Image (cartoon, rainbow, N blue to C red):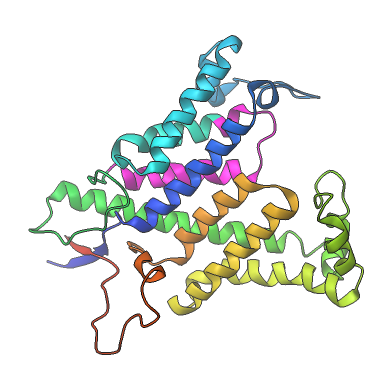
Amino acid sequence: MRRHTITLPWSTGYGWARTLLALGTLGTLMCSDSATLFREVAGVGKYPLCQGVTGAGAWCLASPQDYDIVRWLCCLVLLLVASGWRPALTAIPHAYISFSVFTGIAIPDGGDQITWILSLLIALVAIGDKRKWHWQTQQPPQSALSQRRRYLALVGTSALVVARLQMSLVYFQACVAKLPHAEWADGTALYYWINNYDFGASGWLRPLLDAVARQPVGVAIMTWLPLVLELSLAAALLLPQKVRWMLLPAGILFHLGIAVVMGLWSFALAMWAGLLLLLAPLGHDPDLAWLIRPRARTTASQPERPETQSTALAS
């Protein structure tokens, strides 16, 4: 009988991704009133459209005068998700709210779409998570896992693998879709984006960025560096783990820059969650205590802290 070992997926690493996704949607719902979220779009109609499968969204099940009540109820659930409480109980409501926001609001962005996809995949992990808080470090199993727990672990790990592939494809498409455009090929695209009054830099930041973008070397670096980073992130699953760790802060700073320049904070939070899923090892429990330790962290004589737990599936 062959035995296959898989990583247990219920880690604090995926918990961080859940929290970031919930905070992104929470910010959208808290900082925008119902009149802004649900409005008429020329040539399309008044949102929520409630057509086909989108009719199952939360706001399609309520009357317009109750939209604010539904919005604040969703905010309450998202606070619970972000807190990390009972992932098995909050996973499906989280995915449902993400679906309702993406399909219901008038002007969703790419962050709302990736949040819906990732929250659905993460729900497949969380339904098997028996911890009270998703911040709790995984404990080694005291005995052999039951057959049901093994299958739940397989489903959860498989969902995380699919999420990683999804993020890899997102970055690949983001890079390749730009290449046919002359402005990206000749290194001038960021000049036009920065000075676009609809999507460009905020007024207080535009003079500084415009000064850089008016220099040939400056605008070329600003335009081509994101392409190199996006392509590197697309290929991250083929790279050694130590290289992925180096890509993680680069990716975080990249999306932070987009958020500061364009104001897309919910998008940044969604992509940070995706970066954690893409670049951290499966079942990884981040050791954040090093942030407050003395400068001397670990020595060569100290054993390495295990990052993951695994179980075996018989076939």
Q: In front here: 134 or 147? A: 134
Whether residue 211 sits left or right of residue 47 in the image: it is right
Q: Is residue 303 magenta?
A: no
Image location of residue 33, percent across then percent down: 64, 25
**Residue at (61% x, 61% y) in the render:** 171
Picture quadrant where residue 6 is located? bottom left
The residue positioned farthest toward the left in the image shown: 143
Question: Residue 117 at what x, y percent from top left?
Answer: 50, 44
**Quarter of the N terminus within the rendering:** bottom left
Locate residue 3: give its quadrant: bottom left
Magenta segment boundaries in residue numbering: 101-127
- In the image, taking residue 276 as reference, residue 191 lies left or right, namely right
Residue 172 in sight from this viewpoint: no
Measured along the vertical axis of the image, is residue 224 above or below residue 13? below
Would residue 71 appear left or right of 8 to someone viewing this image?
Answer: right
Please give the name of the residue rendered at 42% of the width and 31% of the height, measured from the top-left corner.
Answer: 77
Residue 270 image offset from top left, x and y in percent: 55, 49
Q: Quadrant of the C terminus?
A: bottom left
